[in-house]
Every structure is written in C-alpha cells, then in structure tokens.
Amino acid sequence: MAELNLVQSINLALAQEMERDDRVVVLGEDVGLNGGVFRVTEGLQKRFGEDRVVDTPLAESGIIGTSIGLAMNDMRPVPEIQFEGFLGPAYDQLVHHAGRMRNRTRGAVTVPLTVRVPVGGGIHAPELHSDSPEAIYSHHVGIKVVMPSTPYDAKGLLLAAIRDPDPVLYFEPKRVYRSYKEHVPEDDYEVPIGEAKILSEGNDVTVVTWGATVFQALAALDELPEDVSVELIDLRTIYPMDEDAIVESVQKTGRCVVVHEAARTAGMGAEIATIVQEKCFLNLEAPVQRVTGFDVVMPYYKLENHYLPEAPRIKEAIEQVLAY
Amino acid sequence: MPKKVAYKTQIDYLQLMDENGKLDARLAKDLLGDEEVQQMYEHMTVCRRYDEVAFRLQRSGRMGTFPQNKGQEAAAIGSGHAARKGVDWLVPAYRENAALFMHGLPMHYVLVYWMGDERGSQIPDGLKMLPLSVPIGTHMLHAVGIAWANKIRGDDGVVLTYFGDGATSEGDFHEAANFAGALQVPCVFICQNNQWAISVPRDRQTASETFAQKALGYGMPTIQVDGNDVFAMYKATRDAIERAREGDGPSFIEAVTYRLADHTTADDASRYRDEDELDAWKAKDPLIRLRKYLEAKGLWDEDKQEALEARAKAIVQEVVKTAEEIPAPEVDDIFDYTFAELPESLKAQRSTMRTTSLGQDPSQVGGAAAQTVR
C-alpha cells in the first residue's frame, strides 16, 4: 500500500477506472498535457491518449453539456471544472438537464456523469476560487453530491461515483489536497455514496461535518478537556444524506454541532438541524449549533481565515452546547 | 505594405425545386426516386393533418400547449430522409415531430407528452433520438456529446440536431458549434430559420445577413437552403452526413422556411405579424409545391389526393385514440425515476405523499394523521 495524498489518490482512481472501463473519458480545460491546474489528471493523457483525456475549449456549459451527450451515448465522462466558481456557466446544463433526464424520459435516457470540482477556501486563491456550493446542488433534484475529506475515501468515492448510474458532483476540498497522506490500497474498492463515517465515537456531543473542516473539527477535539467525549461524523455524501448516522448519534449524545464552510443561510446546516429537530426532539439537551461561513462574499485571502470555521470557533460551539 | 485578405468566403444558397414545383433536372439527377418522393409527400400530408388535429385537441381542452410544425414539413422530412434509421441520431427542438415519426417514434408519443405525461418522452428502445426539448438551444451540446461518443468509439453514426433561428442567440449554440468544430465530431446543425422567435423577427434576432455564416466562425462547411424545398433539404443534409461519416466533421444548414401557424397554441401571431407576409408564405407552402411537382410528373391527381387525405384522417384519428386511451400514470411515478435507486429520504417522502400532505416522514406525524394509512 502506498501513502498518498488526496490528489494522488484521485489520480490513482481515475487511472484504474480508465484501465478497467474504456468508456471512461476525462475532459476539461488543461486536463491533458498540463495534468489539470492542481495536477490531479497528471500523466493520464500520456497513458491513455488524447481521445480519452481531452483538453476541451474553454467553456463550462460546453464541457458539461457535451458530457451529458457523451453519457447519454454510453460513455462514462468525468469532466473537470477547474474551480467551483466556474460552475456557474454550467449550472443550467447540470441542474436542468443532467439532473432531470432520467425522470423526464421515465428512465429511457440516463446520464451517468461524474463532475469533478475543487471547492472551498484556505489556499490563498483569487476571487471566485474559494466557495462551497454543495447546498445549492443538493437542493436541485436528480444530482448526487459528495465530498471526501481523506485520500482513502477520495478513491473509493470516486470509483463509486463513476460507476453510479446517475449524475454525481464530486467536490474536492482543495485545502486538503496535499496536506494529509494515508494508506490508499491499490485494490478496487468503493466507498458507498450515501454513507457517513464515524471518525471518533463519543457520548456527549455529535459534531457533523465534511470536507476540509473535518480537519478543523479534529483540531478542535484536541483542544477539548479529555473527559469530553465527542462523536465526530464525516458526512462524505451531502446528498443523499446519511440521516440515520446523524439521528442515531444525536439520540445517543443529545447534542449536535454542524460545521460547514459554506454560508450559513439555507446551508446544509439548516437541513441537518431540522432533521435532528424532527427525529431527536425529545433527546435534545441543547439547541443545535451551526459553525459556518458567513453570509458574505468569500473574502479575498488576507481575510479568508476570519471567514473559515476554524478550530477555535468549533471548540467554542461544542463548549456552548455542553454548558447549555 | 499591400493590404492582404485574411479570410474570404461566400455563402451558397441551394434550391432544386422552384416555387411552382419545377425541379432542376440537372442538379437533382438521381437524387430521389419517384416512389420515395411520393412517400415523403404522404408523410408530410399526414403530419400536416396531425398538426391540425393537435391544434383542435388543445382548443377543446383535451391537450395542453402544442407547437405546430405547419409550413416546416419539408425541412424536417427532407433532412430526416437523409439520415439512416437506427444508426444516425436525431436531437430535436420541439417542432420536428415529422422527422421523429419518420424514424420510428410512434405518433401518439408526442401527443402524450403535450397531454402532460412524461411517458411521451420515454423514447422506445432501439430508436436513436432524444425527446423534444423545450428550453432553447441547450440540446445542441447534447448532440455534440453524442456525436463525440460516436467518434471516440469509431461508430459511423451521425447526429442531426434541429433548432430555430432564436436558438442561435443562446450561448450554448456557440459553445456547441465551437466544440463540434474544435473536436471535429460528426454532427449536422440544422437551423430552421422560420423568420420568427415567438414575436421577435429574424432581423431583430441578429445583424448577421444569414444564419449560415455563423458557422464560418466555427470552421465548418455551411449552406443556406430553401427549407420549403424537400429536394434541396435532402441533398444538403445527405452531403453533410456523408462528410461527417467520412470523418470530415460537422456542418451547418440554414433552412429558410416559415412557421405558418402561431408559435404555440398559447401564442397569437396576429399581434405581431402582417397578413401580407403570411399570405406570401402560404403561397410557398411546401405541400402545395411538392404536389404541383408530382402532378406535373403525372404521379398525382385529385383522386389520389382525396384518398391520401382520407388516409391521413384515419391515421391521425387512430393516433389520438391511442394517446387518449393510455391509462393515467401511477402517482408513484413522480418519484420513481429521480434516481436509478431511490434514496431513503425520497422513499420517506413518497410514503408521505401516499398518506398525508405534511411533507414529513409519516413515522414523525403524530395523532390522527398517522392513522390515515392508505
């Protein structure tokens, strides 16, 4: 087994799946010779050729729209959009076409498409390069939304996404692209879409998060007194969400903190808090707390750390629900 | 320094049969057999009848909004005839029923669709076509993707995609044309320039003198065709398909035609269109023109016409009956096709729909409401 970071793990998953299934095509801006702006697709064009790793014209609606056509004609396209801020031009194709095609044709036409998109802040990127749009796309029907935080999950979730018969938005938390390594098996394995992971078991409070803030939550846990027992859930799939994992945990702990980078209003934290209220009302010892980004434009990098939900804010929220 | 010309070209205009049904024998040599032409005329006549009946269904409250194809039959049938059934793809907008029927779509599907039932978009197995597309211009990218897949796999199927003049103003048209050119995919763009995008005339849609010349910017062969001339539409499309099949990439065809009806049954074209203009185009009706051709050749007469009209009436009557007799869809149907496998949360919502209207999982609904299990 190799020690890989998130970028290397995704690259390995792409290579292995391209090897296994010749319908898999990687396409996007700069994904070929250049290996993508984050080098996630490095070496793939050399190995699989220009027909299967394609540098497209610079046009996001074009990339997603043609990927829908490829998918409808029995290919397994894996387009890359360079940054989540550039998903906007492809929004119509994603939500109005990819997400609806199975339903509008009553199953006659399907769109097995996996869109890879780096998301989130914390890497000192320019404007429109640091947002977290997972709630927007979870609200639209017919699209699955996943976000791995670790190299192991990244490979397994990507294989599951490419093999999924429906469109999947595969969000990559770019802040942890190279910050953490772990053993990633060479074997073929899937991390099922829709299953959360319990990162640490505990009895006092449930913390639900995903993506880069998993590591901020872990840092917060390290700062808490030893007798505080936190159950940390990495959601991994944003939609369809593993409600059972959250509900079972909160029924045990009676307290819940949700942490996400995206802005607060109508974010996934609101959805999770509602699920907890519906299903764990009589178990709750404290109101559900949200630690999130603010309802402001994601600041340019001199101030971005004030926006991001870092460990001290998470620690404070945990202390508040414990003291309630 | 002497002035150089960086690029120079011209846009050809193709017409084989004039407005009195006279065919240019030299240009049309060996193009279509007499029997083929009669079949095409029959098909156009049946589709005209279909349009008229669909219009009446809407007016009598038996169907929702419907966009008629009246006047554009030659553009759909001429081009559709050039494509190979089960090999080439048709990616339509919403007015090209005639081409879809020609390639095997059962005629009641389109009525079922406009009657508000998604099963009308459930293309039967084995047919290479996408369902009608309501949003403007977005489907051309799908056509390019389908063509691209064919190219990657080495299939020799070509994709025909239809769209109106208004669609050329949409960004996705330009992305589709650019991708098609840059990737050299086997796709034929068929612009049905029917002069109006609802109430906006062709001259307000673009300052471009032709729609055909837009394709020059994307590096593809392009031509303007008399869209009411079934011979010219057939020839232009056949040539484009051959080029695509030979690996020479996409082509563009501007079919100059006219929408004789309103945009849809929800529209009233008399608010923005002159009677004189309409009358002038009525004289160029593709059905009348083709009938004149057949009559001049001694292939057609009044008796045959009467027999055809009776046949068309019977065919369409049967189609309407089939469409109206289809049992209503099951209510679960609105959930069942959201994903290949329904997530737990959607199963809960489905069971909510069956039992209460609270929008919650029934297990969470207390008291009387929880008792109202179906």
Image (spheres, coloured by chain):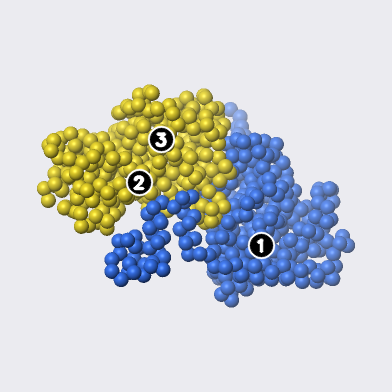
Chain colours: A yellow, B blue
Graded by Cα atoms within 10 Å as few (under 14), some (14 to 19) or many (20 or more), the crowding at tag 3 reads: many
Residue type (three-letter) at the residue carrying disc 2: Ile
For mark 2, name the chain.
A
B201, A274: nearer the viewer: A274
Residue B163 visible in the snapshot: no
Secondary element type, mark 3: helix
Question: Which residue, given by chain and number where applicable, does mark 3 sit on?
Answer: A156
Q: Find residue B119 and report its horizontal and vertical position in percent.
A: 56, 60
> Which residue is the extreme one toward the right?
B298
**B332 sits to left or right of A269:** right
Q: Nearer the viewer, residue A15 or A228?
A: A228
Please name the residue shown 35% across and 38% down the image. A148
Alpha carbon separation for disc pair 2 and 1: 42 Å
Residue furthest bottom as drawn: B60
Q: Is residue B305 left or right of residue A14?
A: right
Query: Mark 3 to mark 1: distance in Å?
Result: 45 Å
Q: Residue at x 48, y 50 (%)?
A: B340
Q: Quadrant of the C terminus of chain B?
A: bottom left
- Amino acid, disc 1: Met
* Residue of label 1: B107
Q: Please tell me which residue is depicted at 15% across the width and 48% down the height of the picture.
A: A321
Q: What is the three-letter code of the residue carrying label 3? A: Gly
- Between B91 and B295, the residue placed more toward the observer is B91
Other-residue count near label 2 (Cα within 10 Å), few / some / many at <14 / 14–19 / ≥20: many
Which residue is disc 2 drawn over? A238
Q: Are marks 2 and 1 in contact (CB under 8 Å)?
A: no
